[in-house]
């Protein structure tokens, strides 16, 4: 039986209240390790945003190798990342002459970073087909096959899987289980899988979130764990919203989930810097309760 490890996306240390500068990846790793995390999910969404994020400059390779060396020396495992998502919106716009080349460049860079860091699962957002009805599954599946084709091939070369995340809006393809099942069926033979975002699942399914997890079954290879009150995408630490964690962890167990318990908590962006470590320690401790629920389910 695989041991579920407690992990967090490094977005937990990415932003602080009234701070415009983003925390460098190495500093975030050091603080998260001190808070109790030895497994990390590398936040790479900032690569396509004008925020001077780690790995966005010309010295990105040097930064990656420095982080890799530190991780090896300190027993930290980077098992997952969040690649950039199509930022102008979920619908591809061919007229975005500035953003599209940047997105392509940083997607390829992100996959290369995964290869260097030993990351197996790189999370991406499904895209919508331009002009298609939200429920036109065939059109959206075809658009995702087109949009991600070269990235899937590159990921396969690097030993990386693209994990398509369930989104949290009925207007966005990928928010429903049937969307992701159709997408995975179409991508059989590719390095494609599913990341189940528990908070997004709560917004879509409410108390049927656990049933949705069971429906997805073994397609789920990684997680985004966070809480909410069922309406807004709040990305709260567990037990601070309304998610029934006992049923969620039992559903993951029933689905045969073999990955890590990985947070995508972002409340630290509104918290003064000196308090961010306390939030991280709380998340690490709360993770022990969630893993216990999983083990005892």
Image: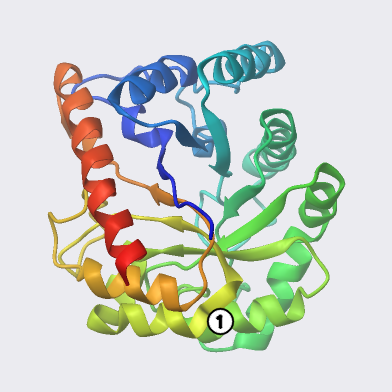
* Residue 206 on image: x %, y %: 24, 79
Left or right placement of residue 290 versus residue 241 in this view: right
Residue at horizontal 75 percent and vertical 39 percent from the top: 108
- Residue 296 seen in render: yes
Above or below 259: residue 188: below
Assign a secondary structure to mark 1. helix
What residue is shown with label 1? Answer: 179
In the rendered image, is residue 134 in sight? no
Q: Position of residue 116 (x, y in %)?
A: 73, 28
Residue at position x 66%, y 17% in the image: 60
Judged left or right of residue 99, residue 291 is left
In this rendered view, identify the residue nearer to me: 144 or 114: 114
Tell me if residue 292 comes above or below residue 32 in the rendering.
Answer: below
Residue 227 picture location, percent across and down: 23, 58
Taking 94 as reference, is 74 above or below it?
A: above
Residue at 60% from the left image edge and 22% from the top image edge: 55
Q: Nearer the viewer, residue 292 or 74?
A: 292
């Amino acid at each position: 039986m695989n041991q579920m490890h407690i992990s967090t996306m490094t977005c937990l240390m990415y932003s602080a209240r009234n701070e415009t500068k983003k925390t460098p990846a190495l500093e975030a790793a050091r603080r998260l390790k001190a808070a109790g995390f030895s497994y990390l999910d590398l936040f790479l969404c900032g690569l396509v945003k004008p925020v001077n994020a780690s790995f966005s400059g010309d010295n990105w390779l040097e930064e990656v190798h420095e982080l890799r060396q530190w991780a090896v020396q300190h027993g930290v495992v980077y098992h997952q990342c969040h690649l950039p998502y199509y930022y102008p919106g979920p619908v591809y716009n061919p007229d975005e002459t500035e953003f599209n080349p940047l997105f392509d460049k940083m997607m390829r860079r992100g996959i290369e970073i995964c290869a260097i860091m030993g990351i197996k699962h790189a999370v991406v957002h499904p895209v919508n087909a331009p002009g298609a009805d939200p429920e036109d599954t065939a059109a959206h599946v075809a658009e995702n096959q087109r949009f991600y084709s070269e990235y899937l091939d590159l990921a396969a070369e690097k030993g990386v899987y693209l994990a398509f995340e369930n989104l949290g809006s009925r207007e966005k393809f990928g928010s429903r289980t049937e969307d992701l099942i159709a997408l995975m069926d179409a991508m059989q033979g590719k390095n494609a899988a599913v990341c189940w975002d528990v908070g997004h699942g709560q917004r879509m399914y409410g108390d049927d979130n656990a049933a949705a997890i069971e429906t997805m079954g073994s397609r789920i290879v990684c997680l985004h764990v966070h809480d909410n009150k069922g309406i807004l995408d709040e990305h709260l630490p567990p037990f601070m919203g309304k998610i029934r964690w006992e049923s969620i962890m039992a559903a993951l167990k029933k689905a045969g989930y073999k990955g890590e318990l990985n947070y995508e908590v972002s409340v630290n962006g509104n918290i003064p810097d000196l308090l961010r470590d306390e939030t991280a320690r709380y998340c690490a401790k709360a993770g022990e309760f969630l893993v216990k629920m999983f083990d005892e389910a």
